């Protein structure tokens, strides 16, 4: 990830993190999966990888792009 000198390391935790509502968390994962055209198997893998990490939407998206090379 070439972001210059301000490059952050994966994964970074945001101050706000994941939404408290489980449905909202699932919606975030589903939206990202759809955006990156992940298969159902990849979607489940993403869910398992980020579970309990308290990441915000952008952190999940950045992680998924790098993890799945999309």
Image: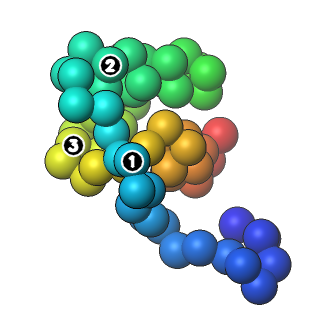
Q: Is residue 25 above or below residue 59?
A: above
Picture coordinates of residue 23 (x, y %)?
A: 25, 14
- Which numbered tag is attached to residue 16? 1
Q: Residues within 10 Å of mark 2 (few under 14, many from 20)?
A: few
Q: Earlier in the sequence, mark 2 or mark 3?
A: 2
For the residues bearing labels 3 and 1, Cβ distance under 8 angstroms: no
Query: Residue farthest to the front?
Result: 15
Q: Residue at x 22, y 31 (%)?
A: 20
Would residue 64 be visible to someone looking at this image? Answer: no
Q: Residues within 10 Å of mark 1 (few under 14, many from 20)?
A: few
Q: Earlier in the sequence, mark 3 or mark 1?
A: 1
Q: Quadrant of residue 48?
A: top left
In which quadrant will I find the N terminus? bottom right
Q: Is residue 32 above or below residue 51?
A: above
Q: Earlier in the sequence, mark 1 or mark 2?
A: 1
- Which numbered tag is attached to residue 24? 2
For the residues bearing labels 1 and 2, Cβ distance under 8 angstroms: no
- Which numbered tag is attached to residue 51? 3
Would residue 66 be visible to someone looking at this image? Answer: yes
Q: Which element type, helix, strand or loop, lies under badge 2? A: helix
Left or right: 5 as drawn, with respect to 56: right
Q: Quadrant of residue 6?
A: bottom right
């Amino acid at each position: 990830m070439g972001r210059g000198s301000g490059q952050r390391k994966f994964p970074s935790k945001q101050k706000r993190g994941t939404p408290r509502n489980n449905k909202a968390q699932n919606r975030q994962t589903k939206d990202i999966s759809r955006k990156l055209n992940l298969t159902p198997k990849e979607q489940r893998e993403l869910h398992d990888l980020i579970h309990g990490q308290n990441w915000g939407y952008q952190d999940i998206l950045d992680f998924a792009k790098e993890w799945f090379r999309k």
